[in-house]
Image: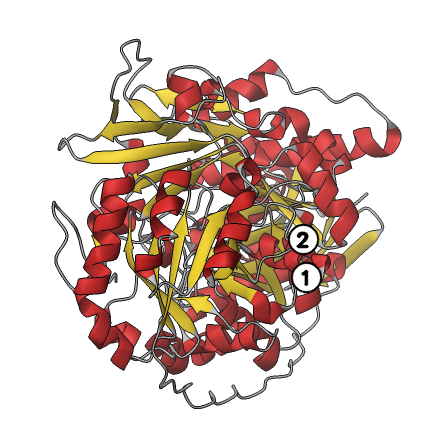
């Protein structure tokens, strides 16, 4: 059985350290488009040196391009940026944006594409879809259990990468807008400010365990590596591109030890047990109020949350350097008068010999065997280690050899042995194609559609009224439809198109009755894959704003798969939207913006799991309100901004931008508020109370 230990690097020094510590591959960010924009990222020259350092040691290097790109970035910068790292030998790109995915596939055909955890792949449908599209690997959502990972492995045939250690997001990766909406620092653009690590008060909860109710502990799965291997995980990913060298290299060294032990345990059915000392060492290297492994076995648990201030605790680990993975070699040194000095290095069945300068007869103090031994054992930052007992010296009496000559001989021998061990080859030139030019924008002259989605019968009964004839499409959530199947017939009888609205995340093998619906509003690639497998035509699928289409190239990538209906993302501003090809897109003009979708249930953690849906209020340090709605059918929470997003007054401007339709999402509104919004759309009047234009006027970096 083969497996990969994948480690993070925030700078070139850490890159080399984690390779020396035993990583099989290293992932890092370049100068742009990485999900850790504030890390000390790699220039192309630095990347070239690090990639060479990895390749000569038989290791791999992956570049994170796991953010969303705007139109100008995609057209002016992306191709040259990707090409630069491709030409210095990057082994794979870790990607979130489907436009970037398509560009790599089209322009750099020999490059591997890894679908980032930002794509929120949580079941086999999305994994299979991505494989069919050309992905070589998927990074699974961190929330998945071993059984769910195994299901993906057995039913998709794609290589799987899963996190094994490090920080957890409380939100499904790629589904978080909290930092973006609160402070304009978008997680989708690599600038997350981590508002989840701040305190929040849950209204009506008196027996609180603490105020840090959105802050997960760090993940540690070192005890379960054999189980992860048997579940189909190939690449074991350590989180931490923002961490220090001691953390990255130290954690890598410990996991290297247990990866080897786990592979042996699986292959030979040997014992696997992590020592108390190594558990303690991992804690000392860094933890956030302890560790959790809950997701591997349970959907959620209150034990995953810190509840207290989530400071990242570290203690120095003095002996971690000794844990680095070194290859033991043997040495034979010969020094004779009137003959060049010679050094032979031996590693397993590989051996190399090099010759140096001729020594001289000692005029004063002769060079001793011990001096030569002391110099030879210092192999520095090479991957080799030499013990005194493994050195054989054949030395003439009264001989003088400058230590600089021994150093030069040692360096040459180590480099020659490295090339022999790794069979170093010059990198072959790989195929590069020019990027395709975009097709002209889609033009639209018809009046925009109006799609209204609802989650409650109270909202539905308001929306279905004849007085709102301007509503062309009515969408009902899968959760609401399963409670009342008669709603579909009522939509049909009203003459509107019936839209089935899928949950933000689809897990497991759950199936839905889709018969009778005209269209399907989906929020993930898992759901796109589910639709494909169910025989639903791509042209009958609407992408929600959660399936990000920032750029025209991303839209075109999906259009090539047959999709024809999209929703503009929340994070683009007025100017950016005007540059976008909107002819087959809806745009949200009213909603409570969903800031997070979480597998962890705040209702359960703060009260109990009683399968009762409620609207819980959270208050932050500035006394701002956020709403939390628990959805028990698929066991997830949605955290909404406390102020509704509304740009109803921009209808005329949006129509000039060519949008195919407007979209209104009702989630937590009562009958009165639902009526008010629909009347405001119809008459142009302003709505009461506080509201926000979100990013429409400001955008994100």
Q: Does dot 2 land on a helix, a strand or a loop?
A: helix
- Looking at the image, which is closer to me, 392 or 574? 574
Where is residue 63? Give x, y as percent.
51, 61
Q: Is residue 388 visible?
A: no
Q: Name above or below for residue 88 compared with residue 475.
A: below
Q: Residue at x 63, y 52 (%)?
A: 514
- Looking at the image, which is closer to me, 342 or 25? 25
Please say if the residues under marks 2 and 1 sit with CB atoms less than 8 Å apart: yes
| Quarter occupied by the N terminus | top right
In this figure, which residue is indicated by the disc labeled 1? 532
Q: Is residue 308 visible?
A: yes
Q: Which mark is residue 613?
A: none
The alpha-carbon separation of the residues under discs 2 and 1 comes to 9 Å
Q: Residue at x 42, y 31 (%)?
A: 630
Q: Residue at x 42, y 85 (%)?
A: 442
Where is residue 359? Give x, y as percent.
63, 58
Res. 135 image quadrant: bottom right
Q: Earlier in the sequence, mark 2 or mark 1?
A: 2
Q: Name above or below for residue 376 compared with residue 483.
A: below
Q: Which mark is residue 125?
A: 2
Side of 410 where 193 appears, left or right: left
Where is residue 635? Give x, y as percent.
52, 32
Res. 416 image quadrant: bottom right
- Looking at the image, which is closer to me, 350 or 494? 494
């Amino acid at each position: 059985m083969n497996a990969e230990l994948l480690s993070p690097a925030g700078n070139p020094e850490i890159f080399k350290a984690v390779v020396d510590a035993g990583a099989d591959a290293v992932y890092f960010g370049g100068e742009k488009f990485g999900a850790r924009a504030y890390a000390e990222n790699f220039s192309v020259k630095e990347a070239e040196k690090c990639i060479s350092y990895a390749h000569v040691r038989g290791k791999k290097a992956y570049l994170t391009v796991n953010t969303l790109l705007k139109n100008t970035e995609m057209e002016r910068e992306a191709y040259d940026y990707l090409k630069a790292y491709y030409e210095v030998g990057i082994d794979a790109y870790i990607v979130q944006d489907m436009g970037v995915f398509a560009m790599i596939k089209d322009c750099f055909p020999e490059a591997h594409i890894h679908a980032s955890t930002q794509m929120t792949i949580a079941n086999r449908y999305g994994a299979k879809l991505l494989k069919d599209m050309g992905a070589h690997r998927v990074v699974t959502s961190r929330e998945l259990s071993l059984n769910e990972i195994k299901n993906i492995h057995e039913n998709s045939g794609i290589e799987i990468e899963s996190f094994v250690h490090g920080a957890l997001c409380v939100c499904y990766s790629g589904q978080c807008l909290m930092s973006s909406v609160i402070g304009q620092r978008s997680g989708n653009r690599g600038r997350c400010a981590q508002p989840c690590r701040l305190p929040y008060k849950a209204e009506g909860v008196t027996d609180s365990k603490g105020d840090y109710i959105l802050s997960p502990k760090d993940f540690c799965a070192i005890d379960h590596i054999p189980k992860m291997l048997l579940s189909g995980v190939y690449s074991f990913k350590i989180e931490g591109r923002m961490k220090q060298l001691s953390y990255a290299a130290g954690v890598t060294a410990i996991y290297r030890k247990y990866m080897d032990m786990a592979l042996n345990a699986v292959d030979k059915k040997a014992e696997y047990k992590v020592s108390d000392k190594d558990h303690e060492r991992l804690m000392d290297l860094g933890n956030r109020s302890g560790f959790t492994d809950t997701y591997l076995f349970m959907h959620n648990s209150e034990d995953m949350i810190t509840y207290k201030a989530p400071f990242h605790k570290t203690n120095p680990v003095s002996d971690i350097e000794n844990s680095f993975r070194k290859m033991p070699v043997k040495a034979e040194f010969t020094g004779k008068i009137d003959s060049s000095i010679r050094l032979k290095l031996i590693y397993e069945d590989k051996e190399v010999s090099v010759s140096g300068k001729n020594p001289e007869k000692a005029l004063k103090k002769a060079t001793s065997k011990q001096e030569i031994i002391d110099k030879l054992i210092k192999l520095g930052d090479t991957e080799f280690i030499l013990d005194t007992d493994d050195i054989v010296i054949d030395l003439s009496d009264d001989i003088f050899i400058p230590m600089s000559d021994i150093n030069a001989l040692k360096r040459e021998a180590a480099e020659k042995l490295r090339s022999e061990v790794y069979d170093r080859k010059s990198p072959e030139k790989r195929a590069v194609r020019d990027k395709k030019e975009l097709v002209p924008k889609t033009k639209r002259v018809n009046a925009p559609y109006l799609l209204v989605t609802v989650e409650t019968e109270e909202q539905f009964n308001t929306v279905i009224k004849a007085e709102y004839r301007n509503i062309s499409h009515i969408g009902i959530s899968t959760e609401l439809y399963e409670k009342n199947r008669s709603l579909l017939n009522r939509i049909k009888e009203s003459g509107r198109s019936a839209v089935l609205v899928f949950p933000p995340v689809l897990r497991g093998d759950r199936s839905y009755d889709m018969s009778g619906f005209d269209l399907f509003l989906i929020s993930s690639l898992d759901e796109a894959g589910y639709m494909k497998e169910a025989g639903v035509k791509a042209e009958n699928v609407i992408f929600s704003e959660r399936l990000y289409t920032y750029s025209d190239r991303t839209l075109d990538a999906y259009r090539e798969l047959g999709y024809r209906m999209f929703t503009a993302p929340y994070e683009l501003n007025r100017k950016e939207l005007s540059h976008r090809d909107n002819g087959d897109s809806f745009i949200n003009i009213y909603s409570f913006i969903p800031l997070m979708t979480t597998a962890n249930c705040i209702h359960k953690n703060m009260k109990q799991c009683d399968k009762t849906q409620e609207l819980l209020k959270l208050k932050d340090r500035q006394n701002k309100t956020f709403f939390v709605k628990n959805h028990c059918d698929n066991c997830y929470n949605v955290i909404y901004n406390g102020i509704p997003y509304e740009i109803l007054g921009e209808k005329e401007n949006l129509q000039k931008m060519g949008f195919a339709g407007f979209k209104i999402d009702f989630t937590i509104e009562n009958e009165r508020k639902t009526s008010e919004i629909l009347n405001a759309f119809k008459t142009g009047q302003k709505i009461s109370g506080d509201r926000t234009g979100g990013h429409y006027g400001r955008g994100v970096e």
